[in-house]
Image (cartoon, grey):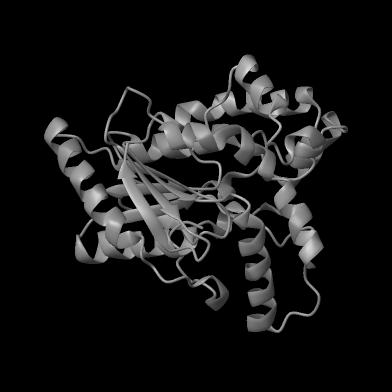
Amino acid sequence: MAQSFDVPLQSRIVDDKSPICIPFILSRIETYQKQHPNTTRPFIIGLNGVQGVGKTTLVRALAETLQGREGLPTLVVSIDDFYLTHADQLALAAANPDNQLVQYRGEPGTHDIPLLTSFLASLTSSAFPPEGIHVPQYDKSLFSGLGDRSPPSTWPHITSPPKIVILEGWLVGFRPLSPVSLEAKYSSPTTKTLHRHLPAHLMFINSCLEQYQQIWDQFDAFVHVDAEDLGWVYEWRIQQEQGLRREKGVEGGMSDEQVRKFVDCYFPAYELYIDGIRDGVFGERKRACQLRLVVGRDRAVKESLVI
């Protein structure tokens, strides 16, 4: 959620990541300002973190430090707030009834990329709109958890341009694969979830990912919070669900098996695209613009490197 940093107790992971990220970000900003001394365009950071790794805690700490200590107005935007409307998601699912990857929100193809594109265009315009900008919001609780876009009248309103924009999300920075590379991933004996889907269905989300590239190409820096073992995502997500029930006294909720099925919906994209993130989202075009943090099972940083 944009500029919303209320973090539930169950997701308050000790922050050992922002002390590593802040010097990297400030260094990139300094270089950017030297290269573009007269620009009014905000510095845009992409941030990718696997589910349950502490991404919410990190972006909260980054925004508070950049804005409070460094005096850099910072806007945090989640790509989750740009999911398709409920009606459009139903239409996508109906048009692809056999493709389980797009029956619910989450995978490439389930976001409103034109909305995100126009939103970023407003933020990066040389003349900030005098009427300000409304930041889209998505309510995951609507339609019994299927979710829908919140009414525009409820969207937060910003009246001055930010200096820093952080776009965060679990698929931020994913680059599409060539058909040959996708087939190689699919044929790998180590795959955990890809064989549960038809190659054509995987190719569908891969082709949808193409339209996201115009967004990623606007990044000036990138932060990737990775895990030594992606399988821990299941464990972390179960811990989050159990913690939420304890904290809020929620009866029921998702069982451990339901959580596993939930993560199964996202895991194919991890298997397809995480190596591309690890190799560097900028390729040879920008060097030393990506920070990769690798965490252990306890979600503490074990390794950090600049790509």
Relative to 15, residue 24 above or below: above
Whether residue 118 is visible = no
Whether residue 221 is visible = yes
Displayed quadrant of residue 87: top right
Q: How many marks?
A: 0
Q: Residue at x 81, y 38 (%)?
A: 100
Q: Quadrant of the C terminus?
A: top left
Displayed quadrant of residue 140: bottom right
Relative to 279, residue 61 above or below: below
Q: Position of residue 27 (x, y in %)?
A: 19, 46
Q: Residue at x 34, y 36 (%)?
A: 124
Q: Nearer the viewer, residue 301 or 261?
A: 301
Residue 182 relative to residue 200: left or right:
left
Residue 236 relative to residue 145: left or right:
left
Relative to 90, residue 295 above or below: below
Q: Position of residue 62 (x, y in %)?
A: 34, 59
Q: Residue at x 21, y 65 (%)?
A: 69
Q: Position of residue 243 (x, y in %)?
A: 64, 76
